[in-house]
């Protein structure tokens, strides 16, 4: 009439726990595989739509009819800005260091540093567009707007 022995109860509990863990892991594995399959299908669709869009904007056939386009394309478009990494940064530091040494050794900079910097900046800036001048009267004064509709005195 007593309770079952402790050893048999522990083995059944541990077996149940182990079975639950196995079921959980199989469910997780099934969901991961199904999600990965869905993800692959989605990626294929995206690639296809991108390829279709690229084909729609493909203008390589027009280059035959526009021979001067190739020459303009090379000179007009600036070099694409690439992502900065360690090697590019080191190269940039070296080139800028050389440029700085050239500027410091230049006789115009040694004679008048601030004036030469100012002159360089003036030459690099685009020319300013002139704003249209305001209209003036024949005597040279600016035109004044008179307010209409106000009476100086109101008599009834």
Image (tube, rainbow, N blue to C red):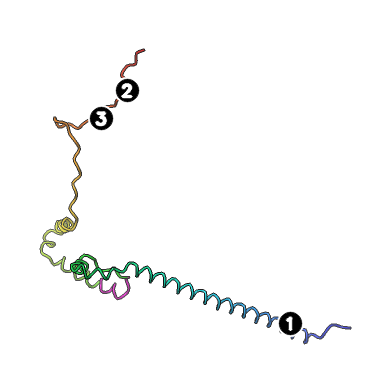
Which quadrant of the structure image shows residue 20? bottom right
Read off the residue under disc 1: 13
Identify the element where label 1 is drawn. Answer: helix
Read off the residue under disc 2: 150
Q: Earlier in the sequence, mark 2 or mark 3?
A: 3
Read off the residue under disc 3: 145
Q: Indicate the quadrant containing the C terminus: top left, top right, bottom left or bottom right.
A: top left
- The location of residue 70, given as percent across then percent down, is 20, 69
Specify few, some or many for label 2: CA neighbours under 10 Å numbering under 14, 14-19, or 20 or more: few
Identify the element where label 2 is drawn. Answer: loop
For discs 2 and 1, the disc positioned in front in the rendered view = 2
Residue 28 vs residue 51, the one in the foreground: 51
Contact between marks 2 and 3 (CB within 8 A): the answer is no
Which quadrant of the structure image shows residue 16? bottom right
Residue 83 vs residue 137, the one in the foreground: 137
- What range of the chain is rendered magenta? 83-92
Res 64 visible: yes
């Amino acid at each position: 009439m007593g309770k079952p022995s402790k050893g048999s109860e522990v083995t059944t509990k541990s077996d149940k726990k182990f079975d639950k863990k196995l079921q959980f892991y199989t469910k997780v594995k099934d969901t991961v595989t199904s999600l990965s399959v869905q993800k692959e299908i989605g990626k294929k669709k995206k690639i296809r739509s991108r390829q279709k869009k690229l084909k729609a904007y493909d203008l390589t056939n027009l280059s035959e009819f526009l021979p001067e386009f190739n020459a303009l394309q090379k000179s007009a478009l600036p070099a694409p800005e690439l992502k900065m990494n360690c090697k590019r940064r080191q190269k940039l530091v070296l080139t800028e260091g050389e440029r700085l040494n050239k500027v410091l050794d230049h006789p115009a900079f040694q004679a008048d540093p601030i004036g030469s910097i100012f002159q360089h900046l003036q030459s690099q800036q685009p020319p300013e567009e002139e704003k249209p001048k305001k209209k003036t009267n024949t005597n040279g004064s600016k035109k004044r707007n008179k307010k209409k509709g106000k009476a100086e005195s109101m008599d009834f």
